[in-house]
Amino acid sequence: MKNGLLILLALVLGAPLAQAASAPPLTQVKVLKVESPGCGFESIDEGQAQTRCNHSGPNIRIYVLEVGYGRSQPHVGLDGFDINGTRTPVCAFDNGNLTDCTVGRKTVGYLYVFDMAGKQEGTFTFSNTSINAPGNTMSTQLYIK
């Protein structure tokens, strides 16, 4: 009986640890920067609806930060057309700053880089859904001129 109680107690006490190890849901998605040969890197402020610089021209890239764990295939487009990109994990230092992931660091989200593939301007949209509870969907958009 005593051994059974100890096993049950270990299982009950161990349950919160298993839950704490699950992937965090999405808590934020945002466009960080837009890059072009004509403007270089433009930082995008929270709530900014369009770029300040006129990026029009070839080779425009859009950098999106996703905090939490979304599905591996987010919905991304420029004026309704699909655009391609890459996804790189980001990790957090002890002080909370984000950085590239190295062995032993915990992934806290992803940095996406999208290529406008020769398009000159338009409304960029990004949305993704958490891979776990509560299954929330987050989105952002930015008009790129």
Image (cartoon, helix red, strand yellow):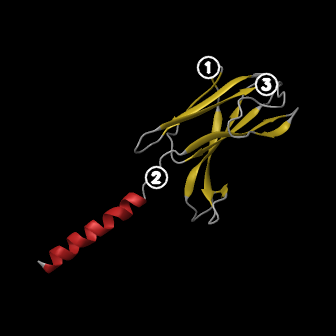
In the image as oriented, which residue stretches furthest toward the right?
A: 38
Which residue is at a point 55% across and 60% down the rendered structure image? 106
Task: Indicate the quadrant where residue 115 lies.
Answer: top right
Q: Nearer the viewer, mark 1 or mark 3?
A: 3
Quarter holding the C terminus? top right
Residue at image mark 2: 23
Q: Give the left or right position of residue 76, taking residue 6 as reference.
A: right
- The residue nearer to you, when weighing 140 against 132, is 140
Q: Give the left or right position of residue 91, taking residue 40 as reference.
A: left
Q: CA distance from mark 1 to mark 3?
A: 16 Å
In the image as oriented, which residue stretches furthest toward the front?
A: 47
Residue at image mark 1: 80
Q: How many marks?
A: 3
Q: CA distance from mark 2 to mark 1?
A: 30 Å
Question: Percent position (x, y) of residue 131?
Answer: 44, 43
Task: Indicate the quadrant where residue 139 lies.
Answer: top right
Q: Nearer the viewer, mark 2 or mark 3?
A: 3
Amino acid at dot 2: Ala
Amino acid at dot 1: Gly
Label 1 element class: loop
Which residue is at a point 56% across and 53% down the rendered structure image? 108
Amino acid at dot 3: Lys
Label 2 environment density (alpha carbons within 10 Å; few <14, some 14–19, many ≥20) = some
Question: Percent position (x, y) of residue 58?
Answer: 81, 26
Q: What label does residue 145 carry, if any? A: 3
Which residue is at a point 64% across and 63% down the rendered structure image? 93
Q: Earlier in the sequence, mark 2 or mark 1?
A: 2
Q: Give the left or right position of residue 84, taking residue 8 as reference.
A: right
| Residue 11 sits above or below residue 51 on the image | below
Q: Earlier in the sequence, mark 2 or mark 3?
A: 2
In the image as oriented, which residue stretches furthest toward the left?
A: 1
